[in-house]
Image: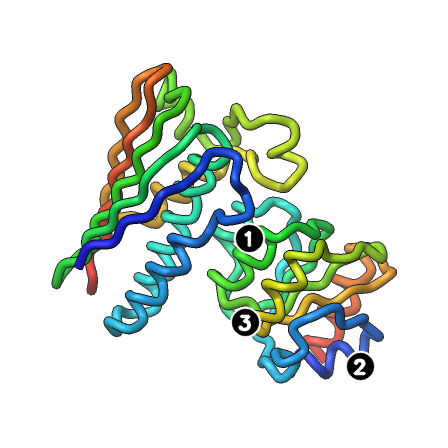
Amino acid sequence: MKLTFSIQGGDFTHAGHPSSEVKKVLKQLDIDGKTIKNIVIALYEAEVNVVAHAWMGTVSVDIEENKITIWVTDEGPGIADIELAMQAGFSTASKEVREMGFGAGMGLPNMKKNTDELQIESEVGIGTKVKMVNYFS
Amino acid sequence: MKVSEIVEKLDLKVYSGKKGLDREISGGYVSDLLSDVMGNAREGEVWITLQVHHNVMAIASLKDLAAVILVNDLEPQENTVRHSDDENIPVLGTNLSTFEIAGKLYQLFNQ
């Protein structure tokens, strides 16, 4: 099963919509609760990253019998140093975004912690492509 | 313990999500950092925070939280109220500080 969603940079009102839809579908498919929780956390964080940093993005979801693969691709500023960005507490979020309670430097670590596979490719000034895989138990 | 019981015993305001007042509470979580709640709060917990915007409800819903308590007399934004009613997850309020309400909830919960 394939699902696609678009995300608009700066649009915090709709942040969480793809995660919410994916959660509903996985529940219908009777995937176990813990796995759904992990996927929802990782996808929500990826969505918020696009909203907080990029101009626009797309979420593509592919649900197969034994796993779910999610690609979150954006057109945005990119990540100059991915290793640094992966460190807990490191953030480049704006003051406004931080005041909302985002931008604590926990997003990428949360994504790492809650996925079985996480790949990030990024080009400064062009955008970022995140691939996340979770296997169903 | 149900959400309605803490509303009564801790004298909380109910801003929205009234249909969720019979939700069962599994514990509490205190944080104003959304990724912290996203990563660490557990299903059925009551979330105490000073954040009043709509993303609070997105997280409460994704994490299946029982209710949200806003501290220091803070009021939820309009779209927060709407989302809370849609999801039947109550947004509650208190004039107490985070420290005080968390202490009272903890005590009540561990009686």
- Mark 3–mark 1 CB contact (< 8 Å): no
Indicate the secondary structure of the residue bearing disc 1. helix
Give A124 or A55, whichever is nearer the viewer: A55
Q: CA distance from mark 2 to mark 3?
A: 18 Å
Residue B51 percent across, percent down from the top left: 69, 49
Say which residue label 3 marks.
B44
Q: Amino acid at mark 1?
A: Val
Among the two numbered marks 3 and 1 on one chain, the one whose residue lies closer to the N terminus: 1
Graded by Cα atoms within 10 Å as few (under 14), some (14 to 19) or many (20 or more), the crowding at tag 3 reads some
Q: Amino acid at mark 3?
A: Gly
Compared with B20, A70 (above or below) is above
Q: Quadrant of the C terminus of chain B?
A: bottom right
Q: Quadrant of the N terminus of chain B?
A: bottom right
Q: Residue B37 bears which disc, if any?
A: 1
Snapshot quadrant of residue A8: top left
Among the two numbered marks 2 and 1 on one chain, the one whose residue lies closer to the N terminus: 2
Say which residue label 2 marks.
B8
- Mark 2–mark 1 CB contact (< 8 Å): no
